[in-house]
Amino acid sequence: MKISATWLREFVDLNVDNRRLADDLTSIGAGVEAILGQGDAAIFDVEITTNRPDEMNHYGLAREAAAIHDRRLRTIEPDLPKAARAAPIPIEIQEPDLCPRFTARALSDVRIEPSPARIADRLTLLDQRPISNAVDATNYVLWEMGKPTHVFDLDLLEGGKLVIRRARPGEILKTLDGIERTLTNDDLVVADARKPVGLAGVMGGFDTMITAKTRNILIESAWWDPITIRKASKRHGLHTDASHRFERGADFESTVVSTNRVAQLILASGGGKLVGDVVDAIAKRIDQAPVALHISEVRRALGEEPGISEILRILRSLGFEVAPETNDASEWTVEIPSWRLDVEREIDLIEEIARLYGYDRFPNTLPAYSGAVIELPDAKKEATVRSRLLALGYDETVSLSFASPEDGARFSPGLGIEIANPLSEEASVMRTSMVPGMLNMLTYNLNRGNDDVRLFEIGNVYEFLADRPLESKRGSFGATGNVLAPGVYQPARPYSFFDMKGDIETLLEVFDYPSVAFDAHAADYYHPLRRARALLHGATVAQFGQIHPDIAARRKLRQDVFLGELYLDQLYRHALRQPGYQALPRYPAVKRDFSFTFADAVRFQEIETAVGALGIKELRTLVPLEIFRSGTVPAGKYSLLLRATFQSQERTLREYEVADWSAEIIRRLEELGGSLRS
Amino acid sequence: MGPYRLHMKTKTAPYAATKLSDYTPGALDDAVTMLLCAVDSEAAALEDESEWKAFRDRWMARKNGILTQINDLWLKPAPRDAKREVGQRVNEMRSRVEDTVEQAAERCRQSASQAHLASDWIDISLPGIRRPLGAEHPVIKTMNEIVSIFRNLGYSVEEGPEIETDYYNFESLNFPPNHPARDTQDTLFIGQQDSKPLRDRLLLRTHTSPVQIRTMEKLKPPIRIVIPGKVYRKDPPDASHSPMFHQIEGLAVDYHIKFGDLKGTLDHFIKALLGSTVKTRFRPSFFPFTEPSAEMMVSCFICGGSGWRAADPCRPCKQSGWIEILGCGMVDPNVFEFVKQNGYDPAQVTGFAFGMGVDRLALLKYGVDDIQLFFQGDVRFLKQFG
């Protein structure tokens, strides 16, 4: 909000320069973000919090400045000529709860012309466009004392009266901006005998506005129910300086003074006469109950500062009336000024005290605490998973939690959660899978020439489960390009399915489980022959593989891309593995290599299972050392070099034992259809 | 070594043991000196292990080695009265020769291993083989740092749902329905909620503050918690806005907490995060769920508070020397009213709360100029934080 320093200083004598004044206002909560211009044109750009409509004008900020510097604030008392006698304009308030007060007064024989330079310049300085003396007078008063007012062409008001009523459904009002608005029963209007002439507290009517032809004027200054104004402003998408103030709460006692101030300004610039007295229709008083202030409560919130006389000085300087006058009471009754609708409770007074005393004057202390730090149940697991993924060479990412409806449906069967007012169609549902986000990031990299990429993300997916939102923890990781860049030491090694599988194995290893099973039942957005899922105790904890070539083609991915998903909520059901000591082997290991030819249909898992079923407890590992096809190997078959390692904890193995076991293994593998080579 | 080497180079005919014609002590001395000179100079000339082996055999072979010859040529024919003297000298000589041979062996082994080492030469100026490590995301890293500072102060971590109800996101935080303060939080709402009562309608939480209420419903006072998490606003993405970002909320409720405790805690925190030289100041602000409310500013840690970076105006602090870091305040008694049943009687307890945008802190801390970089997964960006 723009505030002219010179205008502000009209209401209070201050011995400080603008720089200091800006700092002072900032220190009590009216943050001056910048000082623009110099001298009389100096403008403060002030950020005023939504709870302080009373500060959204020059007089209100002058009041704060006066309180800071303990100076007297001048009052606004418009000096008006004697009015010609006339019958008061009838004002009929049909909705006393929504319009507790409506003040008006009439002027006749006014010349509508441009405002005098002093008025026009000030408004221009605040980026307000001068319109005419009558309209500018209301604008001037708005920026001077924060009270929105309105002027009608009195001759265009039909039936010689004003009615404040709910609009009739379907009633049309053309507002000042020229837009015809269809009203509902929830809208409150100012109407004449026949038609609405203003949307209450938001904007006046077009048909009764001041024009060059206007001679007689009716000034309106009312107090409107904040919620009614806010709803109307929202309903009609019409946020105005008036609605902004009314929905935050205007000063109930300022309707008469603002009416008179507008009248004074119009008379000064456009001549004319006052017709009749001010009409002040009060349908209902807005009473602000006095608030009790206990010194014990001040101390409980703020500690030992400030002292009592300072507390009382602060409150009085802001316009609060405090009784009794004495400093040695333990409790005071505080009357709240009409412009402070935000102050209703003792804590509100305590804030005023702290604010004006100066936050920086309170000592910095650390509170004692006897409670314990309680860790989230999965915190350690997540930290472990995260550090392992980092160690495995995946960069950590965060992607937005939104997805397009198409991706939402493509990558998860879950019931997506729609956003009612999304920023865009591509971000209109909450993600049901981490895959689209990961795929987008991989694509983003490939499109920028980043060929070697490994990423992971830990986050939530969201879906409705029986109409309740369910957030589940997931991990995703993605990779493309080389694991090892080509160099003088080695050729490039591209990332493969088995890198991902190995990384998943390494990751799962941190958990305590008897065994992990892999099968090929993974989602159909993976390559049908290069996908797998990992199960612990029959529950899927991960699925992964190469992205389906169709999807890769649609996204124009120019190299193989691998994706993995971790069902962290499932995984976190397992405890972290507690490392346990096992005695180191004291006897040497014996290695035996076997070279077999198998039909392609025989998978390694069957070989491993078959050998495992022999139950040779001295068999420590069975590792596939080499696989090759073609060459001397007939089509449809492959050659497999296996290395078995035997070791006993109790003794040195004998040659004949190893020979026996080797024979058993060979026999079993031959039963599987393998033939021993050479 | 130099003169010795010169001496070695002047070698003449190889030493050969000859019979002694004179057994006087003087003649014996000369004969011994000659032999020792010969063995030393031959030892010094040895180049490798095979030469050394020949050298050893020439001198020490049982059969016909020079020492054996000396035994035969000097000792055996010696006159009876000189035998004792000659025997002693031959023994001394033998032990000198044995030592020399042994030392020569050591020298040859060393030079052999040196020669072998030379074949192991590599160009150590070639780049090392790097195993790529993953890089932590700057926002998560910053978030973890903040959480750990508060953990050290006795704060536990709490979490809550990102899809919240109006009740937790607004109502119980003292944002009444139709309150203008709701406008400050451009909210993304979940679809098809109109049939529900307002307080049950779902939305994407606009701050991590709802977890304050959720935690106070669950745990009795005193509590100290921090709440990291994602929050959402209807902000179109640009260099400083993202519809999703991260916050850390903090809440301390106890029987003795005062405004100074809020200030002291946050002052301690920001010094732990940014270094002990930063200064803090607090300005009044407004949040519906705290009162008194404040904003904490820190002296600009980019320009050191001067407002200038060399000749350029400091942009992060807009030349003011101060940067707004977080919002905070004493918990509003109205908030406690919502959890009064669980021991949070506003007449008994007080507390403070604070909340900060982690992404913005990370932007400032690392000098990143576009928040969108945090959410694109560009490895050229991410790798900078490894």
Image (spheres, rainbow, N blue to C red):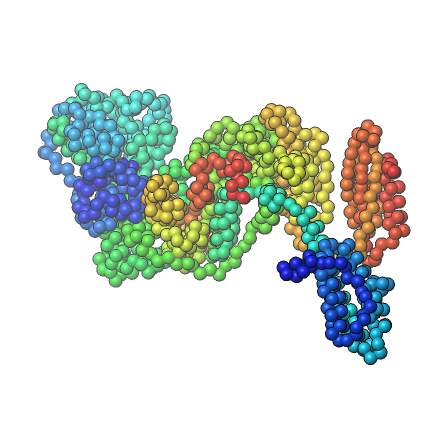
- Tell me where residue A488 sits by quadrant: top right
Q: Quadrant of the N terminus of chain B?
A: bottom right
Residue appearing at x 79%, y 62% in the figure: B16
Along the viewing direction, whichever of A442 and A315 lies nearer the viewer:
A442
Residue A15: tell me if it is visible. Answer: yes
Residue appearing at x 75%, y 66% in the figure: B35
Across and down, in percent, residue A623 comes to 77, 43
Q: Using residue A558 as the reference point, say whether residue A178 is left or right of it.
A: left
Residue appearing at x 29%, y 48% in the figure: A28
Above or below A31: residue A354: below
Extreme-bottom residue of the structure: B81
Across and down, in percent, residue A394 comes to 59, 41
Q: How many marks?
A: 0
Along the viewing direction, whichever of B127 and A7 lies nearer the viewer:
B127
Q: Using residue A503 as the reference point, say whether residue B101 is left or right of it.
A: right
Extreme-top residue of the structure: A213
Q: Quadrant of the C terminus of chain B?
A: top right
Residue B241: tell me if it is visible. Answer: no
Extreme-front residue of the structure: B21
Q: Using residue A110 as the reference point, say whether residue B34 is left or right of it.
A: right
Across and down, in percent, residue B275 comes to 43, 52
Across and down, in percent, residue A640 comes to 80, 37
- Tell me where residue B53 sits by quadrant: bottom right
Residue appearing at x 84%, y 49% in the figure: A616
Along the viewing direction, whichever of A175 and A71 lies nearer the viewer:
A71
